[in-house]
Image: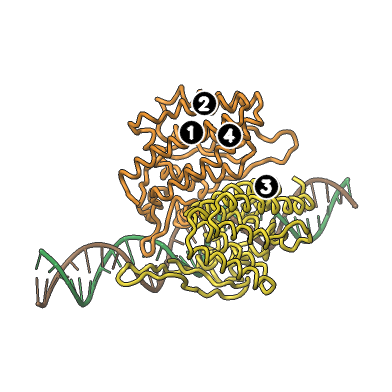
Chain colours: A orange, B yellow, C green, D brown
Amino acid sequence: MLAHWGLTPWGQTPIAIMEGQMSKGLDKIDFQPVTLRDQVQERMREAIIEGHFKPGERLVERPLCDQLGVSRTVIRETIRYLEAEGLVQILPNRGPIVAYLYWKEAKQIYEIRRMLEMAAAQACAENISVELAKSLRAALEHLNNDRSDMSATELYHATSDFYELIFSGAGHDIAWEVVQRFHARISRLRRLTLSSSNRQYSGPAHMQAICDAICSGDGQAASKAVGSHLDDVMQVAEQLLKGEDDY
Amino acid sequence: MLAHWGLTPWGQTPIAIMEGQMSKGLDKIDFQPVTLRDQVQERMREAIIEGHFKPGERLVERPLCDQLGVSRTVIRETIRYLEAEGLVQILPNRGPIVAYLYWKEAKQIYEIRRMLEMAAAQACAENISVELAKSLRAALEHLNNDRSDMSATELYHATSDFYELIFSGAGHDIAWEVVQRFHARISRLRRLTLSSSNRQYSGPAHMQAICDAICSGDGQAASKAVGSHLDDVMQVAEQLLKGEDDY
DNA sequence: CTTTGTATTATGGTATACCATAACACCAAA
DNA sequence: TTTGGTGTTATGGTATACCATAATACAAAG
């Protein structure tokens, strides 16, 4: 099981957190040393997701080296990976920038998410266990109770943790890889959605409905609840994007 | 419009091919210089897709440098990108290897493909134009007529060209990005499927049915034809994988 | 004030050096 | 033959040098 990194704002030093179930007895020891590149990659992905780097902003190598105290090799390999993730794009003769996201792409991302999250919710509901139901409820309670104390980044991650439970409960690990990257690509929209004054959107209520449907084992209801949720967030996102960049 | 690379087996020199519609008049000139890294990346992806590098095979930096005549920087950045694409995985203390694919993952990939390709076929059918129908038929004809003269790699790309037409016709560009990478990850299965003696699989007939349904504008029929196709290839792939690695 | 020419600078592309450490090879002892 | 110790090698991680060229700044001419 791979270590993941504690939440650290841009500019602070991350620390590794070994979490979850370790292998036991005489199983192979599951340890992977964390390279500088791993750390920088996580840090820069977080910085993009939380809006520290804005769409269109250039990611110039040497200033990033100075900021993070690493060599250009580490920065270049990190940028390569983030490019493959769709978070960064390379402009000819200008170098890397944080990728823009127009409604045309965002719409397609929401539609794919809708398909994959509906399928995952249904499968998760149909495979629900007492333990998983407990974990889902706990994740949602954490989301709801600590919501006002959370930064946008913490909220983003708490929401992702909730979805990750659904996808792993469904056994949809590959779909989760896809959706996770989509979550990152539309992170700015997700943050805007949360701060939007739009009253038609009610994330907490939707997630409660999703959680209830899954925990009761009702695949159809779970799928439907996710579909409704995605329909609503798509609508809010469309209004936000149409207001600022018309493509 | 970006140049793409002509098909070149591992060990030969690739040449850039400028294809398709160029910008005209006094539009911005759409040109992106091709770096060594671009070339190596394409080359190595091709080498993995066509089976030159086998799952589990180590991708050792210095021998690859010698083989391709480039520096470790180019190789390392290439490996980073392919890692993000899921074609390469990094083993602790062992370095990069060509990623294994077990049935558990392959099954999920086929299921996601099924969803995305069905949706694309339906949307493409419902948006069909005379021009697009013509292109689809031409692509299929090329596939069928020249099939016996094609290497496995050429067959792979001709099939991908057919699907790309469907996805772009549907306007499902993001889904195509996802599916394209899945195609690469299961390329070995696709090659095995084609060489399999399994009689229940009939790719050419399926693709004809897909093409006919799309060109006739029947979204439901197109979606159904794709679903049937994917059901069959999944079954063949399962038998192949179950026979060699049981996970 | 605008345009053009030119010098300077910034920056990505690429190569190579160096190091730590895990993998591997080999040998001796039991 | 097996096991343990030790030396050697392979290899990934990381830093830095060098270069080409596009971007930028600046000045002069109209």
Q: CA distance from mark 1 to mark 2?
A: 10 Å
Q: CA distance from mark 4 to mark 1?
A: 12 Å
Q: Which residue is mark 3?
A: B107
Q: CA distance from mark 4 to mark 2?
A: 11 Å
**How many C-alpha atoms fall within 10 Å of the one at disc 1: few (<14), some, or many (≥20)?**
some
Q: Which residue is mark 1?
A: A228
The first of marks 4 and 1 along the sequence is: 4
The first of marks 1 and 2 along the sequence is: 2
Q: Which residue is mark 2?
A: A209
Dots 2, 3 in contact, CB < 8 A: no
Residue A73 visible in rendering: yes
Dots 1, 2 in contact, CB < 8 A: yes
The first of marks 4 and 2 along the sequence is: 4
Amino acid at pointer 1: Ser
Residue B41 position, x and y percent, is: 54, 64
Residue toward you, C4 or B117: B117
> What secondary structure is found at the residue carrying circle 2?
helix
Q: Let me know if marks 4 and 2 both belong to one chain.
A: yes
